[in-house]
Image (spheres, grey):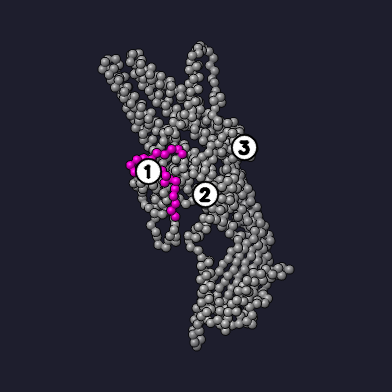
Amino acid sequence: MFFNTLRTWVYTEVLMWQAFTKKLDDLRTCQSTCWFMTLLLISLVLIQAGCRSPSEYRMQADGVASDIIAGKQKEAIGKTEPFGIERPSDILRRRLLDEQDLLYSSEASLGTDKLKPIEHWPQEDYPQTASSPDANIPIEPNNAIKISLVDALQIGARNSDDYQSRKENVFRAALDLDLERNDFRNIFRAQAESGLTSNTTGDSTVTTFENSGTVGGTRTLENGIDLSTALAVDLANLLTQGGASSLGLAADTTVSIPLLRGAGRHIVTEPLTQAERDVVYAIWQFERFKRTFAVDVARDYFGVLRQMDGVDNAQENYRSAIASARWSQRLSDAGRVTQIDVDRATQRELEARNGWISAQAQFKNRLDSFKSSIGLPPDARVELDPNDLEQLRERVSTMVEAVIEKTESEATQKTPPADAPIELVPPSNEDAGPLEIDESLAMQLALKSRLDLRAAIGSVYDAQRQVVVRADALRAGLTLGAAATFADDDDDGSLSIKGGRYTALLSLDLPLERTAERNAYRKSIISLEQATRDVQLLEDQIKLAILTELRTLLESRESLKIQALSVIVSEKRVRSSTIFLEAGRIEILALLDAQDALLSAQNSLTSAIINYRIAELGLQRDIGLLQVDTSGLWREFSPEEINYVTEK
């Protein structure tokens, strides 16, 4: 029964070749030159159909990978987004190098399209030119470009090397998946050989010219069965007019069926299954990276603005110190203060100058570091928009005004006696921001939404499958093989292939030596334990991050209120000290201390404002609900969406 089935399958495979050879037999009356020209024409057609240029291969790979990514995006994140890895030639980094006349080491700094062609380069059309939205950002050669936070997010998505590498990782995973899928497709091959042999061992030299060709195909089924077939043709015998009566055709077909080790769909398709999941993991990892990258850009951006504000504060403090030193000298000349007070004022002027210079250096260092983080040259002339910091101040102005109003109201009340009990009032959620949600709810949202946690949980399932695969390798190997061979060598001039040679083989591999497989199996169990611990560790890290961000929000909100009051008190203190010093009621040291306190309070207030905003973004990132599109822009989580997320 088995051989009958095999014979039927083999005859089906060679059916089209019988029709082809029938046509050739009808043409045996042609002249030798006609056969040669026909063969040459067929060869050229096959070469043209079977060969592609490197550019065509690249475009084909791009199309396959793009289709895979689009399909896996729907599975991974529930939507599809444009995805490409070709970097435009006019990204902002390159334009800055060119239009601001910045230094660079070689053409590689500008991009692959500027590289000098090398010998044997396969593609004349690579890289292709493409326009970038960065081209809309105007650059004046002698002026710095000003960018906002929105600009910085988009610039980073298009210019950051890390961002580009993360995208390429997704693309590589898609290509790996295509290669694994290819193992279960029909694989066709064709080749031709020509040989010239000269035999001088006899009385005369005998020269023979042999031409042969082979076409065939293989297919691996998902149940583990391997099928292969090949048809060999002796072209010289086939095309020689009046030569041998046999056509020189030979067909060979083999089947291999694993029965024990290596059998079963779950074993055979394991590499394909893992490759399918790896693309999903790569998309999740990229989505997680986009959110982390956006928050990091915002943190660095506001860090530069904070340092910029610190420079302004240090500058005003330096001006105030100069004025105080001059004033103390005039008072000393009038005999109203001692030389010690003058020296104190002069010393503070020197310290203020040092602080001003240090603040400028820190600002420049922070700005250069930020430019590098979004993919721009650190020596590029770039300015940040201070209006983003003013907008943050406006966001918290209502909170600050409420604190001031409450403080002024309490100030009108009678001061408690000195011996009255002291009650410490802990911070409350009375004026909490919209994202200061319950800890348990925040952790619940995070455990449902974090993509890296999904990937970690998926890795546990992957590790379980590996245990199954490694255990299967410990079994005995039993393989059923079969082969059928046909050859047209009956010399009767007939094109039909009568009969054939059939072979059946049963191969048994006893599990006498399985040291490598045994160790691999044990390692797979260890890997499963590690994957499980990775989930536990990541889960704890997520909870810790959520708790930390919520406490940072609370701390920043309270610090914001405290520093706002501190600025008000410090300003009053500076004004009062100035008046009392003019009246001779205090020493100049009190004024100097008040000025130092004002500088510290101003810087602390700016830090509190920025810390609160970054904590809001960080909490959304750690929960996993901060959405970032392909351009790098985010869409923030709204508390109104909580019910929708928890019910998913």
> In the image shown, does 314 or 134 lie closer to the viewer?
134
Q: Residue 175 in the image: x percent, y percent?
A: 54, 55
Q: Amino acid at mark 3?
A: Tyr
For the point 29% across and 22% down, which residue is it? 326
Using the numbered discs, state the Cα–Cα distance from disc 3 to disc 1 in whole angstroms: 45 Å
Q: Earlier in the sequence, mark 3 or mark 2?
A: 2
In this view, 335 is above or below 295: above
Q: Earlier in the sequence, mark 2 or mark 1?
A: 2
Q: Residue 183 in the image: x percent, y percent?
A: 59, 60
Using the numbered discs, state the Cα–Cα distance from disc 2 to disc 1 in whole angstroms: 28 Å
Give yes or no for residue 142 being in the magenta stretch.
yes
Range drawn in magenta:
128-150
* Residue 139 tag number: 1
Please give the residue where the numbered disc 2 appears in the rendered image: 83
For the point 38% across and 35% down, which residue is it? 363
248 sits left or right of 48 in the view: right
Please give the residue where the numbered disc 3 appears in the rendered image: 644
* Residue 406 tag number: none
SS assignment at label 1: loop
How packed mark 3 is, by other alpha carbons closer than 10 Å (few <14, some 14-19, many 20 or more), is few
SS assignment at label 2: loop
How packed mark 1 is, by other alpha carbons closer than 10 Å (few <14, some 14-19, many 20 or more), is some
In this view, 400 is above or below 625: above
SS assignment at label 3: helix
> In the image shown, does 97 or 345 lie closer to the viewer?
97
Tags 2 and 1 touching, CB below 8 Å: no
Foreground mark, 2 or 1, reads 1
Tags 3 and 2 touching, CB below 8 Å: no
